[in-house]
Image: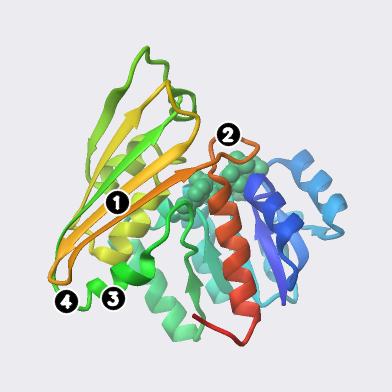
Amino acid sequence: MNIALIGCGNIASIIARKARNVRIVAVYDADEQRKNTFAAQVGAHASPDLASLLEEDVALVVEAASPSAVRQTAQHVIKAGKDLMVMSVGGLVDPVFRSQLIGLAREHNHRIYIPSGAIGGLDAISAARVGRIDSITLETRKPPGSLGLTVASETVVFEGTPQEAIARYPRNINVAVTLSIIGGDDRVRVTIIADPATRNNTHRITVRGEVGTLTFEFANEPSPNQATSLLAGYSAVALLERIAQPLHF
Ligand SMILES: NC(=O)c1ccc[n+]([C@@H]2O[C@H](COP(=O)([O-])OP(=O)(O)OC[C@H]3O[C@@H](n4cnc5c(N)ncnc54)[C@H](O)[C@@H]3O)[C@@H](O)[C@H]2O)c1
């Protein structure tokens, strides 16, 4: 499967290193030098702009850049006749923008893929949503530096909705938006804890509803940029492999 990448950072590097059944044909990044270096490393075309990237013969465009890149590019990708994979799920936090994008994808008969990212259990949560979901809580614990903070001891730095969380920490709390998309926008409450004693990004999720109580905990190792969980990069690779293969689970 031929793909193009928007964003040539940490997740793009993991995809380039680990994905076996995809070929990176073209890449785009707002940082010119990073784009050219990455393109040379992976043998891809460095597109001068988004319009040129979308003229490439690819089935799927992977966004691995930023929430603002999602808002700037997602509709163009679908209109150009490509499927889209969104890593910066925070860019889909606005339900109006999201439903317009889904409508566009339906109209053009294309798909929008969201990798499980730094968490998992989305299969069980979507099954639970067939019935009644009462609440979903997400407690995220991170090293203070990855939140851009300095604190002496464990500190609750945020409590609120995914919308409020992504507005405060746009690079850090994509998983809250993934949960609200799959579990219902009004169901999710988020707590973020800055903890100097940890080097992992830990997400503890509790879903309560008709099916019972589901609990998940992910104590993620960081990837080389320290902010992104290694699991998030690997989830993009795993999803690409699934799309490229006939076996789906
Ligand atoms: N879904 C999840 O669970 C999850 C987990 C971790 C990270 N993420 C998100 O995935 C994205 C990529 O993560 P990463 O670790 O590779 O980040 P990174 O900082 O290593 O790389 C991002 C790259 O995108 C480029 N970029 C940013 N905005 C751009 C724009 N508007 N147009 C073009 N290029 C742009 C930057 O120059 C940079 O090279 C981030 O938004 C991050 O928050 C999602």
Q: Is residue 234 above or below residue 159?
A: below
- First in sequence: mark 1 or mark 2? 1
Q: Residue at x 54, y 52 (%)?
A: 231
Q: Circles 4 and 1: CB distance less than 8 Å?
A: no
Separation of residues labelled 1 and 3 (CA atoms): 16 Å
Residue where numbered disc 1 is placed: 205
- Percent coordinates x, y for residue 180 in the rendering: 28, 59
On whether ligand 1 comes within 8 Å of the CB at mark 3, the answer is no
Residue 66 visible (yes or no): no
On whether ligand 1 comes within 8 Å of the CB at mark 4, the answer is no
Amino acid at circle 3 = Ala
Q: Circles 4 and 2: CB distance less than 8 Å?
A: no
- The secondary element bearing badge 3 is classed as helix
Say the numbered circle drawn on residue 131. 4
Residue where numbered disc 3 is placed: 127
- First in sequence: mark 4 or mark 2? 4
The 10 Å Cα crowd at callout 4, few under 14, some 14 to 19, many 20 or more, is few
Q: Residue at x 48, y 72 (%)?
A: 112
Q: Is residue 138 above or below residue 123?
A: above
- The secondary element bearing badge 4 is classed as loop
Separation of residues labelled 4 and 3 (CA atoms): 8 Å
Amino acid at circle 2 = Gln
Is residue 139 shown left or right of residue 142?
left
Amino acid at circle 1 = Ile
Amino acid at circle 4 = Gly
Q: Circles 2 and 3: CB distance less than 8 Å?
A: no
- First in sequence: mark 2 or mark 3? 3
Separation of residues labelled 1 and 2 (CA atoms): 22 Å
Separation of residues labelled 4 and 2 (CA atoms): 38 Å
In front: label 1 or label 2: 1
Residue where numbered disc 2 is placed: 226
